Amino acid sequence: MSRTIIIGGSAAGATVAARLRRLDEHCEIVIYEKGPDISYASCGLPYHIGGVLPGKQSLVVTSVGAFVNKYNVDVKPLHEVLEIHPEDRTVTVRRLADGKIITDSYDSLVIAAGASPAVPGFIKGANLSQIKTLRTIEDADTIRKDVVSGRIKSAVIAGGGFIGVELAENLIRSGVSVTLVELKSEVLGVMDSELGRLMTKHLRRNGVDVRTGTGIKGFTVSSADGRETVDAELTDGTRVESDLAVLALGIRPNTDILKNTGISTDEKGFIRVNSYFETGVDGIYAAGDIVALNHVVTGKPVSSALAGPAVRGARIIAGRIAGLEEVSGFPGTTGSGIVQAFNLQAGITGFGAEYLEASGLVRGKDFFTALVSQKSHVGWFPGAGFLFIKGMFEKKSGRILGVEAVGSASVDKVIDAASALILKHGTYRDLMELDAAYAPQFNAPKSPLNMLGFTAENIDLGLESQTEIQELLRIIEDMERNGGRSGEYYLLDVREPSEVMSLRLPCFNNIPLGTLRDSLAEIPKDKTVIITCAVGVRAWNAARILAGNGYRTSVLTGGASLYAMYK
């Protein structure tokens, strides 16, 4: 009878145990879990703090007792694995209840010990007990109780990633004033700042004091009149006083137990595994937040603190341990992620343009981008929300390198479909051919991803050029310094005058699309004409009219609607 030991009982560990039991009724399966719970939903922690989830037990997918009864697994909570000994296939374990040290043997070992919140040593006072992190149910429950009691009326959050954004929303909804500090120029730094800015502004409109371009230098704690406060010093010299400080600065893998095992890790400490999640040491597998996975786009390992890759990897591991002959290897991750705050959704799959450029690729030579402004379904049907989608495409082949989306609805639909195409090395032509389900309350005859594909084809064929919002703002700034004039550009707004009155873009000349052919003499031919409308469709039509008459043109990405949200 074979014996499998699993270190860690969260998503990856619990899934290995459940799948392995289904495949082998008689093998011995032991889970050692350092905490009191297994199989809990860490992604729901901010929503427990905000009261969206009624109690901490809502986060526990399966209790220890129920898991044991259902899968006949020996679950040992509050047990910490201290050492792994591959030479004799044993582990050293501390029983936390009384400190007793025990040794256990295995035929197969699965390391699913997860990761811990990153607490940078360069932040002074980061290890003070008053500085919190958010990784366990106990972390969330402690903060929740202080919020409900009224002890916490203000909070500072370090880090504007997905967790930081979700936590900010839930604290605001609970009546807590929030300062969110993000070192990058916008929140959601995994996305291009062009779209990340929309979330930054949205958070501010909903009461979050977002401080971008600055970080945390250090913390000090003071007490007065029985009240304890945290003083955060920012790298820009300002200070923020609050009742709560939370670090949301990413994770570090729990790989201290790997010493002298021969298991290889990358420069950040994540375990290197092959497509079957084998570590290279006989009988030892690893999955979950503790591993680095190959990215489909680059083929290079990346960390992925997401439950999806964790449970898919766990399924592969269970199949290998059970001896299944037809177990498919892991094809790689697309790095898909999504977040929602105050009814604004933002998601990404693959990589954004800024990441690709930082990796050494050259925009226009190695890859190009396309951005479309769409509705979540046809505009004439009630409830249509706005949706901005940006795609990154390999110049040589048209392969999809990444897709980002921000909108009030349907972002998940866009990211999921794009991720599936990236996984299969799809191109913008596949976006054009995507046969999406259509009914007016769900989609449009030409779906948003169809439109992204059509626009990418136009750009690739040289039929369309796009100017991004950041570049436009630089052009406008130069023109305003020169009295509204530019030697290189002519800015054209083809909306109707009534639309321009409600939102006027600086330095733009208004010629409605319907009168454009009769007004060509007003437009200089020696300048590049940057064209806008509400979302980009009329601007594209205007660009084709002008191109047919010998003009150089470029369409403003997202049109006036994106400009209004960005500016």
Image: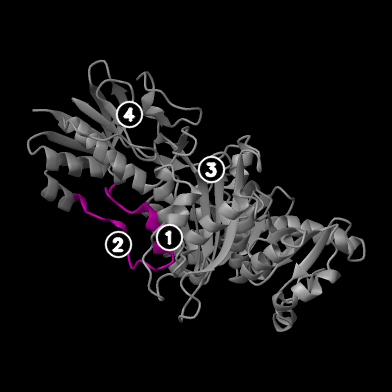
Residue indicated by mark 4: 82
Residue indicated by mark 1: 412
Magenta-colored span:
36-64
Identity of the residue drawn at 69% across and 62% down? 556
Mark before the other along the chain sequence, 3 or 4: 4
* Residue type (three-letter) at the residue carrying disc 3: Asn
Mark 1: secondary structure: helix
Asked if residue 221 shows in the view, the reply is no
User: Please, which residue is most extreme toward the top here?
Assistant: 87
Mark number displayed over residue 127: 3
Between marks 3 and 4, how big is the CA–CA gap?
23 Å
The residue mark sitting in front, 1 or 2, is: 1
Between marks 2 and 3, how big is the CA–CA gap?
29 Å
User: Nearest the camera: 180 or 490?
Assistant: 490
Magenta span has 520? no
Identity of the residue drawn at 57% across and 57% down? 455
* Residue type (three-letter) at the residue carrying disc 1: Asp
Mark before the other along the chain sequence, 2 or 4: 2
